[in-house]
Image (cartoon, grey):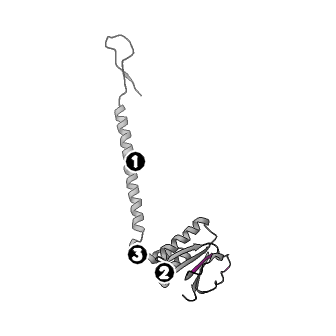
Amino acid sequence: MQVRQQPALDGEDRAPAETVIPNAESRSSRLRRVATLFVYTWAVYTLIQGGSLLVREPYLDNLRVAPRAAQGAAGDGYAETLIKLERTLPAQARVQLVWRRSDGGVVGFWYGYFWATYWLYPRQVDIITDPASIDSAHGILLDVRSREKAELAAPPGYTISATYPYADQVVTVFLKSNA
């Protein structure tokens, strides 16, 4: 780096009053240009990647399918069963859900409750985790269990309507005998 010193005004060899660095402004200008070029390059790259993802997504195919079918295809066996049951169960029926899946803990319990209330609306859904507390006031009983759990015997006054086995769980539907 070259430093140019300006001579003192009185002609003596004193230290200059100020040091001038030539091309300092051009260096900052060059740095600004490089930073701007980097930002523009990154923006173009992002647009290309985003456009590629948008073009590859089958939006028109998804729009041609009913949301119910798309959710059923993407969900687990429990969600698929609820979608099937939604059309067959009477709207005024009360549903009791016996949640016996071992995965998920509290999160799994709320997962079961959320999807049951969502798909079976306007039916009132109550959820329990212990089969001993089954209430006979409900017209429909859903037993959702992990494969390793024992099958629930039909409670008094209920008959098995359908059983839906899946890879990780089994969903059994019980209907009240006089309902």
- Dot 2 falls on a residue whose secondary structure is helix
Question: Which percent across, then down, holds residue 6?
Answer: 34, 19
Circle 1 residue: 38
Comes first in the chain, label 3 or label 2: 3
As measured in the structure, the alpha-carbon distance from the residue carrying label 3 to the one carrying label 1 is: 38 Å
Q: Nearer the viewer, residue 150 or 19?
A: 150
Q: Quadrant of the C terminus?
A: bottom right
Q: Nearer the viewer, mark 1 or mark 2?
A: 2
The picture quadrant where one finds residue 175 is bottom right
Tag 3 near tag 1, CB within 8 Å: no
The picture quadrant where one finds residue 138 is bottom right
Q: Is residue 43 left or right of residue 168?
A: left
Q: Amino acid at mark 3?
A: Asp
Q: Which residues are magenta?
A: 141-151
Tag 1 near tag 2, CB within 8 Å: no
Comes first in the chain, label 1 or label 2: 1
Mark drawn on residue 86: 2
- Dot 1 falls on a residue whose secondary structure is helix
| Label 3 crowd bin: few (<14), some (14–19), many (20+), radius 10 Å | few
Mark drawn on residue 61: 3
Comes first in the chain, label 3 or label 1: 1
- Residue 173, placed above or below residue 15: below
- Residue in the picture at 52% in, 78% down: 82
As measured in the structure, the alpha-carbon distance from the residue carrying label 3 to the one carrying label 2 is: 25 Å
